[in-house]
C-alpha cells in the first residue's frame, strides 16, 4: 500500500469532504449485528467517527501515524497503525468493514484474502469513494484542465479506478447493488484551494518541480470563483 498522504495529514483532515450522513445510514442498514466495525485506511477518522454512533466498538487503522495524530478522538474508537493487507485482528471479528477513498492503493489479492479472514460470514464489506467534483461552468473548465493536463501526468496509475467509479476494481464478493449518492457543498475559495492541495498529484508535482502547480491557475480560478455560487457536487 502506498502512503501518499502523511505529509499533508493536517490539510487532509481540514479540507477533505465528509461522507453525508444519509450515505452512512444507508450503508449501516445492511448490517444485522452492530457490535464491531473496522474502517481501513481511516486517515483522519471521518468514517470511523460516523460509524461510532451505530457500533459498540470501532477500529480505525492506517499506515500513517501522522494521519492518526489528526484523527477525531472518540470514546469507542480504537486507532492503530496497520497495513490493510496484514492486520492483527482475529478471524471473523467484524460485522462491518469499510474502506473509503483508498482501496485503489491496496494489493488487491492480499487485501481481499485478509477481508475474508477477518469479516464475519454474514458481515458487510463496503467500498466508498468520490470522484472529481463538478462546480460552475467557468471554474469547471479550469479545474478539469488542472486535473487532466497540469497535474494529469503526476497521478498514480491507480487513480483510474476512481475515475471509473470503482466499477472496474476486482471484487471477489457477492455484490449488493446500491443507491447512488452525491455530496453537495458550498466552499470558500480557501476551501477549494485547500482541497486541490491535498491531491496526491499536486503533491507529486511539487516534489518533482519544487513549485506549486496551483500557482498556474490561482488567479483565473479566484476570479471565476468569486463570480459563482461557490457550490460543488461530488459523485459518491
Image (cartoon, grey):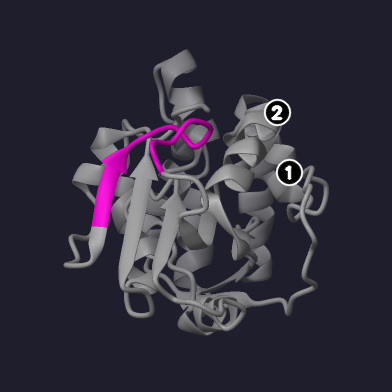
Q: Quadrant of residue 9?
A: top left
Q: Position of residue 173 (x, y in %)?
A: 77, 54
Q: Secondary structure at mark 2?
A: helix
Relative to 137, does residue 83 appear above or below in the rendering? above
Q: Position of residue 229 (x, y in %)?
A: 51, 80
| Residue at 50% across, 46% down | 91
- Nearer-the-camera pick, 19 or 33: 33
- Nearer-the-camera pick, 200 or 141: 200
Q: Specify few, some or many for label 2: CA neighbours under 10 Å numbering under 14, 14-19, or 20 or more.
A: few
- The answer to whether one can see residue 53 in this image is yes
Q: Is residue 82 magenta?
A: yes
Relative to 86, does residue 32 appear above or below in the rendering? below
Badge 1 is on which residue? Answer: 161
Magenta region: which residues?
78-89
| Residue at 37% across, 45% down | 61
Relative to 108, does residue 234 appear above or below in the rendering? below
Q: Is residue 52 magenta?
A: no
Q: Secondary structure at mark 1?
A: helix
- Nearer-the-camera pick, 146 or 157: 157
Relative to 149, does residue 70 appear above or below in the rendering? below
Badge 2 is on which residue? Answer: 157
Principal secondary structure, stretch drawn in magenta? loop
Q: Specify few, some or many for label 1: CA neighbours under 10 Å numbering under 14, 14-19, or 20 or more.
A: some
| Residue at 19% across, 44% down | 69
Q: Position of residue 65 (x, y in %)?
A: 25, 35
| Residue at 64% across, 42% down | 147
Q: Is 98 on the left or on the right of 35, as rendered?
A: right
Q: Is 9 on the left or on the right of 229, as rendered?
A: left
Q: Position of residue 75 (x, y in %)?
A: 16, 67
- Nearer-the-camera pick, 181 or 134: 181
Amino acid at each position: 500500500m502506498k502512503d501518499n498522504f502523511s505529509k499533508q495529514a493536517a490539510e487532509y483532515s481540514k479540507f477533505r469532504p465528509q461522507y453525508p450522513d444519509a450515505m452512512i445510514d444507508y450503508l449501516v442498514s445492511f448490517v444485522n449485528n452492530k457490535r464491531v466495525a473496522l474502517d481501513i485506511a481511516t486517515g483522519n477518522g471521518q468514517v470511523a467517527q460516523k460509524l461510532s454512533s451505530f457500533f459498540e466498538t470501532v477500529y480505525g487503522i492506517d499506515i500513517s501515524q501522522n494521519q492518526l495524530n489528526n484523527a477525531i478522538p472518540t470514546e469507542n474508537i480504537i486507532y492503530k497503525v496497520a497495513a490493510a493487507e496484514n492486520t492483527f485482528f482475529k478471524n471473523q471479528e467484524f460485522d462491518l468493514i469499510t474502506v473509503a477513498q483508498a482501496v485503489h492503493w491496496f494489493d488487491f489479492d492480499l487485501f481481499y484474502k485478509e477481508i475474508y479472514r477477518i469479516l464475519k460470514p454474514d458481515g458487510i464489506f463496503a467500498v466508498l469513494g468520490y470522484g472529481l467534483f463538478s462546480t460552475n461552468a467557468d471554474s469547471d473548465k479550469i479545474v478539469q484542465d488542472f486535473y487532466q493536463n497540469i497535474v494529469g501526468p503526476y497521478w498514480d496509475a491507480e487513480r483510474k479506478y476512481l475515475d471509473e467509479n470503482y466499477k472496474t476494481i476486482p471484487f471477489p464478493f457477492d455484490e449488493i447493488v446500491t443507491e447512488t449518492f452525491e455530496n453537495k457543498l458550498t466552499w470558500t475559495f480557501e476551501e477549494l484551494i485547500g482541497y486541490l492541495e491535498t491531491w496526491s498529484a499536486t503533491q507529486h508535482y511539487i516534489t518533482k518541480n519544487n513549485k506549486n502547480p496551483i500557482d498556474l491557475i490561482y488567479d483565473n480560478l479566484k476570479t471565476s470563483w468569486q463570480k459563482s455560487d461557490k457550490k460543488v457536487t461530488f459523485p459518491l
